[in-house]
Image (cartoon, helix red, strand yellow):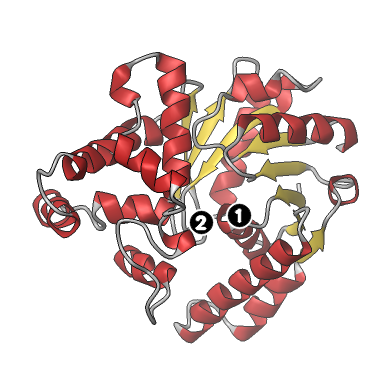
Amino acid sequence: MKNVAVIGAGTMGNGIAHAFAQSGFRVQLIDVSENALKKGIETITNNLNRMVSKETITEAQKEETLSNISTFTSITEGVEYASLVVEAATENIDLKLNIFKELDKHCPEGTILATNTSSISITQIASVTSRPDHVIGMHFMNPVPIMKLVEIIRGYNTSDDVTKTIMDLSKTLGKIPVEVNDYPGFVANRILMPMLNESIEALYNGVAGVYEIDTVMKLGMAHPMGPLQLADFIGLDVCLSILNVMYEGFKNPKYAPCPLLVNMVRAGKLGVKSGEGFYDYSESKKAEKIALQFLK
């Protein structure tokens, strides 16, 4: 398994492509937008340059990693020789179902189809393919090149062989895979998102301000990043999407998104990606650098 296609060149997609390419895999990075592909390669290059400056890798290793990545705007061309596809498109169920229909149609028969979804049912995604036993979740954490965890989510029909293959493969990337079952939010977001939502509720109800809430959780609970800053880093739109999936999946009001979160997303205040969320990222420092300093 040396040819891996990654669908989506955004934050998660380019991070996943980076991780595979640095581990010696040939990566086909696919996005409908040429501009997104260009930005994705720029991000990977900048991250590799940072690693070179820290002497984590050599200049030669950087160049080899970049040479392992090819870009495509066509799924048909990009997945032609793929042994594994990792879908990392926007957290939208209709979009993902359409992508997996296309992947099923154009991928070789034995190709494993993985999704980086953070909350959507693997079983539901697999149901639109003719190979549900070959569909699995690979939920990477952001930033992918740094974070060690990968949630490996089995759908109802995911085979033991495919699960073992993906668990072993994750280890070759230097990751620590953890197998979980297919329920809304899986483990990471089932626990994390209610905490972030409750932090937003505390702000909404006037319990404390943004800085105060984050400081309490950083100093009192030893969290490397406060929950409101973490929500900004994840993307408030992504948080809202995950909470909506969990609310619909469990029909439990404890997963209902806070009205403040809903209004901020409606207003386009999405956090790091938009330049403003609970914090203002529009000044001289780039938002991702602010967030990443807590992960060093």
Query: Can you identify the residue that label 2 sits on?
Result: 144
SS at circle 2: loop
* Residue 186 showing in the rendered view: no
Quick one: 42 or 172, which is closer to the camera?
A: 42
* Residue 82 showing in the rendered view: yes
Residue at 78% of width from left, 63% of height from top? 34
Name the spot of residue 245 as percent of width and height, x first: 48, 26
Looking at the image, is 23 positioned above or below residue 99? Answer: below
Instruction: Judge left or right: residue 88 versus residue 193.
Output: right
Name the spot of residue 176 as percent of width and height, x first: 46, 46
Query: Can you identify the residue that label 1 sits on?
Result: 16
User: Label 1: how many residues lie within 10 Å, few (<14), some (14-19) or many (20+)?
Assistant: many
Tell me the distance, in whole angstroms, between the alpha carbons under discs 2 and 1: 6 Å
Name the spot of residue 184 as percent of width and height, x first: 46, 23
Q: Amino acid at mark 2?
A: Val
Residue at 36% of width from left, 65% of height from top? 291
Instruction: Judge left or right: residue 71 versus residue 145.
Output: right
SS at circle 1: helix
Quick one: 266 or 217, which is closer to the camera?
A: 266
